[in-house]
């Protein structure tokens, strides 16, 4: 009977990945199409990808597939052949190749079934993904960016927008995509006849968002083909000026791809220009935040003095403290309302007062 789940600890797998000398390519892809039996689809795909030593995170639902993975370079052609033959809807699917990649993005293959590949909160039975906004290639994106009447809308989370975005793009400030959809429609209610260009990391969110905006009565809706990843790759290949500035946040071990040399964000602890995300070293916190090298040394990679103090406690005492906390702590906390970000707003006020 084939193995359908990983049986080795995360620690061992990460160590093996870091020691691996075979080059890997980081890839993302998605496709909206009907999958009648998601669990069976998942199990059969897992067996084939595991045999090719694919690592990464893949979600499968009745509405389609969403994947962020890394593939050993020697297996890349076999991987493509396997994927393209697996289902007619996947034949020739676009693969977004990472722009800034050392191959150390994932160390285990996790494949899960979900209700939706992108949680959207939409319960309107008349909503359909059959009608989506028009795709824009890199050159077309730059043409639209030159038009002051065109509105670029960032359909990513606040912490993604913070380190990089298209010039003058509208931020829809939220922690979740499901919150963003109605917020975007409300923010743009007076721009129904304008050109609206939606974008996200790899295209999956903005494609659904473009369908939602059309469903809400907006007329001229576009979205960046392949998202920021494909745009950046094509802009570089074609010698185009990048209208996306800064870093593209990615949901893997890298936490970001450098697109341009612009640093548009600041350390959440001291305000120094910085766009390096990290997770707090305290296992009872793991807050995702931006930290400069100086603050990393000062706080030992933690987000606060309290977390630094707890980080240096004996391991057993750390465990006891975590066990005693009501409801625990959200791991990989990214909330824009976290106290650290409130602290950041205070030094921003102080800095403006001093200027």
Image (cartoon, rainbow, N blue to C red):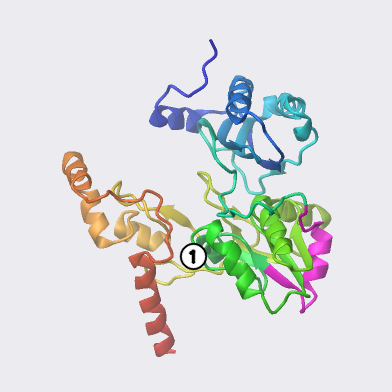
- Of residue 16 and residue 131, the one placed in the foreground of this image is 131
**Residue 286 located left or right of residue 241:** left
- Of residue 44 and residue 349, the one placed in the foreground of this image is 44
Q: Quadrant of residue 334?
A: bottom left
Above or below — where is 254 with respect to 346?
above
The residue to which callout 1 is attached is 274
**Circle 1 residues within 10 Å: few <14, some 14–19, many ≥20:** some
- Of residue 310 and residue 294, the one placed in the foreground of this image is 310
Q: Percent x, y for residue 294? A: 38, 62
Query: Residue drawn at (67%, 71%), measured in percent from left and top?
Result: 167
Above or below — where is 28 with respect to 88?
below
Helix, strand or loop status at disc 1? loop
Quarter the C terminus occupies: bottom left
Q: Percent x, y for residue 330? A: 35, 51
Q: Does the magenta segment cover residue 194?
A: no
Query: Residue drawn at (39%, 27%), measured in percent from left and top?
Result: 9
Q: Does the magenta segment cover residue 151?
A: yes
Q: Percent x, y for residue 195? A: 78, 71
Q: Quadrant of residue 211?
A: bottom right
Q: Percent x, y for residue 323? A: 21, 43
Examine the rendering and report whether any part of residue 202 can be seen.
no
| Mark count | 1
**Residue 226 located left or right of residue 271:** right
Examine the rendering and report whether any part of residue 218 can be seen.
yes
The part of the chain drawn in magenta is 131-152
Above or below — where is 159 with respect to 326?
below
Query: Residue drawn at (66%, 74%), measured in percent from left and top?
Result: 188
| Direction front: furthest residue | 125
């Amino acid at each position: 009977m084939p193995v359908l789940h990983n049986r080795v600890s995360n620690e061992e797998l990460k160590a093996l990945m870091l020691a691996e000398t075979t080059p890997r390519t980081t890839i993302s892809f998605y496709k909206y199409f009907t999958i009648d039996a998601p669990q069976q689809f998942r199990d059969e795909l897992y067996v084939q990808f595991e045999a090719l030593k694919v690592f990464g995170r893949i979600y499968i639902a009745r509405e389609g597939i969403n994947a962020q993975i890394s593939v050993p370079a020697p297996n890349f052609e076999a991987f493509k052949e396997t994927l393209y033959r697996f289902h007619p809807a996947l034949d020739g699917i676009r693969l977004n190749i990472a722009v800034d990649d050392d191959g150390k993005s994932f160390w285990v293959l996790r494949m899960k079934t979900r209700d939706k590949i992108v949680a959207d909160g939409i319960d309107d039975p008349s909503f359909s993904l059959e009608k989506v906004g028009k795709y824009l290639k890199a050159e077309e994106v730059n043409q639209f960016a030159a038009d002051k009447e065109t509105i670029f809308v960032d359909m990513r989370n606040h912490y993604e927008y913070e380190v990089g975005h298209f010039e003058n793009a509208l931020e829809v400030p939220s922690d979740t995509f499901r919150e963003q959809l109605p917020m975007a429609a409300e923010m743009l209610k007076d721009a129904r006849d304008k050109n609206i260009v939606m974008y996200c990391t790899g295209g999956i969110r903005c494609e659904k968002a473009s369908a939602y905006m059309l469903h809400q009565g907006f007329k001229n809706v576009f979205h960046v083909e392949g998202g920021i990843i494909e745009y950046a790759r094509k802009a570089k290949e074609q010698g185009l000026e990048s209208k996306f500035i800064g870093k593209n946040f990615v949901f893997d071990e890298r936490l970001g791809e450098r697109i341009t040399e612009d640093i548009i964000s600041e350390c959440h602890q001291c305000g120094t220009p910085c766009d390096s995300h990290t997770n707090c070293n305290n296992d009872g916190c793991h807050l995702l935040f931006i930290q400069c090298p100086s603050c990393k040394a000062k706080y030992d990679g933690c987000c606060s003095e309290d977390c630094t103090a707890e980080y240096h406690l004996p391991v057993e005492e750390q465990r006891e403290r975590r066990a005693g906390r009501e409801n625990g702590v959200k791991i990989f906390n990214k909330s824009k309302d976290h106290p650290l970000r409130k602290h950041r707003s205070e030094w921003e006020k102080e800095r403006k007062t001093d200027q």
